[in-house]
């Protein structure tokens, strides 16, 4: 990591021009509100990372480095705003300079520009968490468990965990949907086979009995067992296997579709009503509909993010992580829409399975219409079948369901009006055909049985593959979550131990027995702390604002220790102990000196240095603590003298 040697700032944030010599030491900056303390922190952060943390994230819409990085009088001249840092790279033992302009934050000038220097600085730029401000403390302490998990995992560079879990969930859902469709196809094929064989259950003995009855009539040897290779029509001559249809089987197929058609109006009635009700909610709340539609788009967008360019609108972002954070934040706001989406998809899946069964019946009758030369009816059934296949796919997505909304009011199957009459006419035509001879009936029975048994076996094969895929996805997801939970538990145990140690060090007089518990669960991180031996509670339940600030800093330090280990040599702490009283600030400085002796902290505070404050700052390290009131304007704007040109004011301790 690094230690900061010096900085030169021009026309940046609230600072006109300022030079500071940090000398690789701990450094404190004091001054009242508006004096420019945070501007120095922003300048250091910008110089190292090209970012300004306070201009990004929640509540910063409309803010940007380009527009709000320059000093207020130079907003139209971003090229005049720049920061020059002199940095010591600890691991390389080299001093380098970085000059970064607001007009081109991604193109810093680095001297020397050696490859190892660039690599080291690129690593620093990838760690904006070196800066902690008071407003960021609350993202650890008072946020909801889901958000806390995201924030802490982002700091620990574990944010891919959520992305991987989301990808596994998506894969699992898709494969489960495929399996449901495959299962419905098995049922359709099984129904067709049983209907032809006229057996109540598809048991081997029942199938063999029905087949052997016809084989015996034809003088063929009986089948002793049913295996994967068994063929009901084995032994039939090629002529006997010529395409034809079995009259009685055809009549059963026609009756099956006719009986089913009488129930089409009420098919999946409960699910259709639920879908219609959900759409009524969406119509009553246009914002919810927009959120729901946007949610699907954002979910797709997150999967397509590869770099800082938004895949949805081509807008360039500061970096990929900020883009991902923005999209995730929008998703979090649409939780209610997400629940509605799940309900719609669940009911849509039921309709999709019913559609598969209807399509299966149509396919059987379409063949009969073709055999009987009823081309117009065959074409009608084919068009309807293709349409239902398309409907089935639409039932699997919110966008598709939305497109089908009108069908849920008028009959989602869209049954052709002429279906009953055409079915009756075709049935009458088949009935009028002379009964087949016993021999022909047996032959066509066996050939039809062979075709339908083959179809059933094929759907079973595909269903097995779909089942294996769905089960594998489910197991992979569960194993991932289980292993992840174990690893996170170990990680968070270490973090909570360090956190508790640090917090006890700050509050050793009254909370020497303090303990805390970080509890990860799927996508969440619960955080409870001890309140004077009365049990574990959320930090916001009983602890004061000062205690909460102390907790935030201690948790941050514990995370930095876990992330960097001995390489944690630099951190910016912007007014993070504002609500902490003087006595506990003394303990805070003692904590930094004792547990982080090799870390250069740059700290801002409202307090002026002198007396007890100087003693507290002396605890920061063996070197002299520094103080500076940077100021932020020139005399020409007519502001009070305390705002006059910047100057350093070391404090002798």
Image (cartoon, helix red, strand yellow):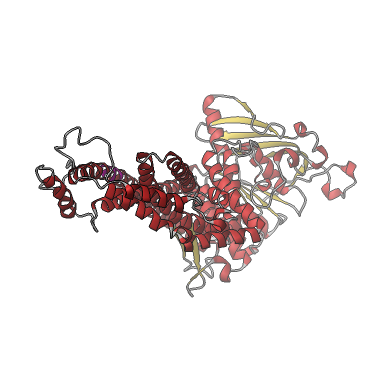
Asked whether, in this view, residue 399 is left or right of residue 187, the answer is: right
Q: Residue at x 89, y 44 (%)?
A: 637
Q: Nearer the viewer, residue 280 or 32?
A: 280
Q: Residue at x 72, y 48 (%)?
A: 37
- x, y percent for residue 412: 51, 54
Q: Is residue 419 above or below residue 440?
A: below
Q: Is residue 464 above or below residue 317?
A: below
Q: Nearer the viewer, residue 97 or 365?
A: 365
Tell me which corner region of the image, top left, top right, bottom left or bottom right, holds residue 608. bottom right
Q: Residue at x 64, y 33 (%)?
A: 86
Q: Nearer the viewer, residue 322 or 570?
A: 322
User: Which residues make up the magenta segment?
Assistant: 454-459
State the count of labels.
Answer: 0
Extreme-bottom residue of the structure: 534
Residue 117 within the magenta-colored segment of the rendering: no
Asked whether, in this view, residue 430 is left or right of residue 22, the answer is: left
Would residue 426 be seen by someone viewing this image from the given angle? Answer: yes
Would residue 593 be seen by someone viewing this image from the given angle? Answer: no
Magenta stretch prevailing secondary structure: helix
Q: Nearer the viewer, residue 222 or 522?
A: 222
Asked whether, in this view, residue 438 is left or right of residue 91, the answer is: left
- x, y percent for residue 424: 41, 52
- x, y percent for residue 392: 46, 48
- x, y percent for residue 373: 38, 39
Q: Is residue 271 above or below residue 100?
A: below
């Amino acid at each position: 990591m690094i230690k900061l040697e010096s900085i030169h700032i021009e026309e940046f944030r609230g600072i006109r021009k300022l030079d500071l010599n940090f000398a690789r030491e701990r450094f404190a900056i004091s001054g009242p509100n508006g004096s420019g303390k945070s501007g120095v922190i922003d300048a250091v952060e910008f110089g190292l990372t090209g970012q300004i943390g306070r201009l990004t994230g929640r509540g910063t819409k409309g803010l940007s480095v380009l527009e709000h990085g320059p000093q207020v009088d130079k907003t139209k001249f971003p090229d005049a705003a720049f920061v020059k840092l002199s940095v010591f790279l600890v691991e390389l033992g080299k001093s380098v300079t970085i000059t970064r302009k607001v007009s081109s934050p991604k193109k810093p000038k680095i001297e020397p520009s050696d490859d190892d220097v660039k690599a080291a600085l690129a690593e620093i730029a990838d760690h904006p968490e070196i800066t902690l401000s008071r407003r960021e403390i609350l993202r650890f302490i008072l946020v909801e468990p889901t958000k806390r998990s995201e924030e802490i995992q982002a700091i620990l560079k574990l944010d891919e965990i959520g992305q991987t879990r989301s990808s596994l969930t998506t894969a699992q859902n898709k494969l489960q949907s495929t399996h449901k469709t495959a299962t419905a196809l098995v049922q359709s094929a099984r129904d067709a086979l049983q209907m032809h064989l006229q057996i109540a259950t598809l048991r081997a003995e029942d199938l063999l009995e029905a087949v052997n009855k016809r084989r015996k009539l034809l003088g063929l040897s009986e089948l002793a067992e049913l295996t994967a290779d068994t063929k009901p029509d084995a032994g039939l001559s090629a002529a006997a296997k010529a395409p034809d249809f079995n009259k009685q089987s055809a009549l059963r197929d026609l009756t099956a579709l006719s009986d089913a058609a009488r129930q089409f109006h009420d098919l999946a009635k409960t699910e259709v009503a639920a879908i219609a009700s959900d759409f009524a909610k969406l119509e009553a709340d246009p914002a919810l509909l927009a959120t729901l539609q946007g949610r699907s788009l954002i979910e797709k967008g997150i999967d397509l993010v590869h770099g800082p360019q938004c895949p949805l609108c081509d807008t360039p972002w500061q970096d990929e992580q900020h883009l991902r954070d923005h999209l995730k934040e929008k998703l979090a706001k649409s939780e209610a829409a997400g629940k509605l989406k799940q309900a719609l998809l669940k009911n849509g899946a039921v309709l999709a399975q019913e559609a598969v069964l209807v399509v299966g019946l149509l396919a059987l009758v379409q063949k009969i219409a073709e055999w009987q030369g009823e081309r117009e009816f065959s074409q009608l059934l084919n068009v309807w079948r293709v349409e239902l296949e398309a409907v089935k796919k639409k039932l699997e997505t919110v966008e598709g369901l939305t497109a089908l909304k009108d069908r849920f009011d008028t009959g989602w199957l869209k049954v052709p009006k002429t279906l009953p009459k055409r079915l009756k006419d075709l049935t009458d035509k088949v009935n009028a055909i002379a009964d087949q001879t016993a021999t022909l009936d047996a032959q066509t029975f066996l050939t039809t049985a062979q075709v339908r048994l083959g179809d059933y076996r094929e759907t079973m094969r595909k269903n097995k593959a779909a089942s294996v895929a769905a089960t594998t996805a489910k197991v992979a997801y569960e194993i991932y979550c289980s292993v992840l939970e174990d690893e996170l538990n170990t990680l968070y145990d270490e973090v909570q131990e360090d956190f508790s140690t640090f917090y006890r060090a700050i509050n050793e007089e009254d909370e020497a027995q303090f303990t805390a518990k970080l509890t990860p669960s799927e996508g969440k991180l619960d955080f409870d702390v001890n309140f004077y031996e009365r049990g574990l509670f959320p930090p916001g339940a009983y602890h004061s604002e000062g205690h909460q600030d102390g907790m935030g800093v201690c948790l941050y330090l514990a995370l930095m220790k876990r992330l960097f280990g001995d390489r944690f040599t630099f951190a910016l702490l912007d007014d993070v102990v504002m609500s902490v009283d003087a006595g506990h600030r003394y303990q805070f400085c003692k904590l930094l000196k004792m547990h982080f002796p090799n870390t250069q902290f740059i700290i801002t505070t409202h307090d002026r240095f002198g007396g007890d404050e100087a003693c507290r700052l002396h605890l920061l390290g063996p070197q002299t603590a520094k103080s500076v009131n940077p100021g932020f304007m020139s005399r020409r704007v007519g502001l009070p003298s305390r705002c006059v040109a910047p100057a350093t004011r070391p404090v002798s301790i």
